[in-house]
Image (cartoon, grey):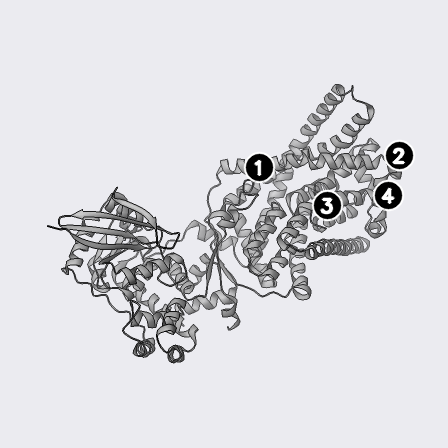
Amino acid sequence: MEKIKIRVALSGNPNVGKSTIFNLLTGLRQHTGNWPGKTIEKKEGIYEKDNYILEIIDLPGIYSLTSHSLEEIIAREFIIKEKPDVIVVIVDASSLERNLYLLIQILELYSRVILVLNMIDLLHEKKYKIDIEKLEKKLGIPVVPMIASKGIGIGELVDKIIKVYKGELICKPEKIDYGNLEYIIENIEEKIPKNIDGYNSRFIALKLLEGDDIVKNICKERINYEEIEKIIGKREDTAISLANARYQWIKKILMDTLEKPKTPVITLSDKLDYIFTHPILGLPLSFIILGLVFWLTYTINNLLSDPLENILGIFQKFLEKYLLFLPSFWRALIFNGIWQGISILLTFIPLIIIFFFFLAILEDTGYLARVAFVTDRIMHILGLHGKAFLPLMISYGCNVPGIMAVRTLENEKDRILLILISSFIPCVPRILVSAFFANVFFPKYASLILLSLYFISFLSVFISGKIIRKFFLKTSFSPLIMELPLYKLPNFKIVGIYIWEKLKAFLQRAGSVIVILSSIVWLLGNYPQKNIENSLLAYIGKLFLPLLKPLGFNWQLISALIAGFVAKEASLSTISTIYQSSGENLRNILLKEISPLTAYSFMVIQLLYIPCAGTSATIYKETNSLKWTIFSIIYSLTFAYFISFILYIIISLFKTLL
Amino acid sequence: MTMVTKILNYIKEKQIVNKAEIKKKFNLSNNELELILIQLRDLGYIREKNITPLCNNCPYLKSCSQECLKSEILFVELPKQDLDGK
């Protein structure tokens, strides 16, 4: 006797255990291909029981039957065109609200449906109780509780599939009452045939009210759509009313059948977020935490930097001894040029490790995402684009990937605006230069000085955003919802990798760009004669002296700023190379040559002025415009000068008054 | 005013919101909020934007530890045309 074939389609949201059930049913008797004309995988298999062969088709995981994604279109067309004998809708029992939404949509299209409540054990773990019989009655379809991972419930599912096919179990889904909209739905249904291309008239009416493009096009081809368009009228009200009706329907069904624990669970993440993302407290708190990180970094670093300087000194002497065979020119280039540039940066190794240790912990625990969220929200309130979040967050490490992250924005003007302001976020090399100056000139208040620089950069992003939006790029806002990651304990392996990757990048730059730059600076400082005051380097620096003299700058600081264009940390190596000729300790000579106020102005300027060469190249690549690249350089240069100048005058006046 | 409308208006008003805030403000469970967001997506009011593919193509991926951005943060946008008509 020939066996009876039953075509069964499995449908459900992604990650509800659909594939597990498919594999349990079909075992090795399955094959995989693609949906006709599509690149999405199609899985089919068979299951035999008694006189029946169940042909199982695994539909793509979807959230609804609208035509937003290819998966949704495939699933809908399959139900319409292939007309399976039974559809099994698999839901995650612990996320019923979201999952039942798909069930509603399928029931509006098809009636022979079985609902599988998979992962029912998770529901029980949450202390929820569900009345299966009542749920069956309310929905009007069979319901099967299941734990697919343990194979529990598979037998019952197969039995019910066969019973539904044989008509022993009747599916009579309850129709959702759309309230006031029922009148409009009926009106539309009257204007269209009972069935168009396999879709029933009610489904068509609902989808037209929701603005489904595919259904709309089908109607335009087959019927007088203008009449229907008049009935639909303004889409927003009706579409939202449909969503409300469905939301209420699901809520009512679950209220009658699902018993939840009385007290809602407030997670630790919720409690922490209440404080860390608080509209008023959030930002000051982030500054306090950042200040604490700086303070800890400095305190620990101060314990380690002196021994490291001593080790570097011993290493230098050792090298000098073994390189005595070299001609004096090469020895001078290596020890007075390259080594001076590199060694000053190498003294930052403890600082980098400590700073990135804390930064990695803040990031890995999920706190840094909150800082960006709070910052971003405040910027949005003040008039900046909401999606500054991502570039801002990434730019804290390095501006280059931060600027690349601007690609997430579709609008070109938004992209350019964010590219221009992202470069004001202090990257790590800039912080290193500032950290050195803060430690030399303000040893007691170094962490507060760094914090003030962060504040200035924050203000610069805000002010520049306002200026550029008002005068150069008029952009509009797109609101957004974000899902912040849950807080978690830091993974020290990840923290270790993070520190190592940053340190490696720093050392690679020190070993390449800084070596070359230090050599060039030393050569320029010794050409055409050995007196550095009459050198080419001094000549270049002095060219810009009239501009920066009012801020107390000397040509040495200006040369450092010029070198900083190549790589920000080169400012420091350049200063070290220039001042080595005096033979004095760099800290002492800086304290003698520059006032604390000038040092602070230098920190502000190097924080904000022109993006480094790598960032500028990325700006060009991302904007594909020389005009905007030059604009970003000129704008940041002007802005940095202006801000630094204002600060210099204000602090000078303040000092005079005191 | 119904829940879906309330949430849509809240997003429009706040411009940038955390899902946890919406849940707290309207006393919603995670599932209830997800249901509303899926419906709003179906209606074309919000658009999901997962940044993971972008991170995967980033040349700085190896030295980037933005784990939270790579996997868990999801952008949902409100199309401009709908907001302009607010």
The type of residue carrying mark 1 is Glu
Q: Separation of disc 3 and disc 1 at Cα?
A: 23 Å
Residue density around tag 2, few if under 14, some if 14–19, many if 20 or more, within 10 Å: few
Q: Residues within 10 Å of mark 4 (few under 14, many from 20)?
A: some
- Residues at marks 3 and 4, CA–CA distance in whole angstroms: 18 Å
Q: Earlier in the sequence, mark 3 or mark 1?
A: 1
Q: Which secondary structure, mark 3?
A: loop
Chain bearing mark 2:
A
Disc with the residue nearer the chain's start (3 vs 4) = 4
Position in image of residue A192 (x %, y %): 31, 76
Q: CA distance from mark 2 to mark 4?
A: 12 Å
Chain under label 4?
A
Foreground of the two, B69 or A126: B69
Whether pointer 3 and pointer 4 mark residues with C-beta atoms closer than 8 Å, the reply is: no
Q: Which residue lies at the image location 71% right of the left edge and 43% below the top edge?
A: A566
- Report whether residue A356 is seen: yes
Residue B9 screen position, x and y as percent: 47, 68
Q: Tell me, yes or no, whether dots 1 and 2 are on the same chain.
A: yes
The total of numbered circles placed on residues is: 4
Q: Earlier in the sequence, mark 1 or mark 2?
A: 1
| Distance in Å between CA atoms under marks 2 and 3 | 26 Å
Q: Which residue is mark 4?
A: A539
Residue where numbered disc 1 is placed: A501
Distance between mark 1 and mark 4 Cα atoms: 39 Å
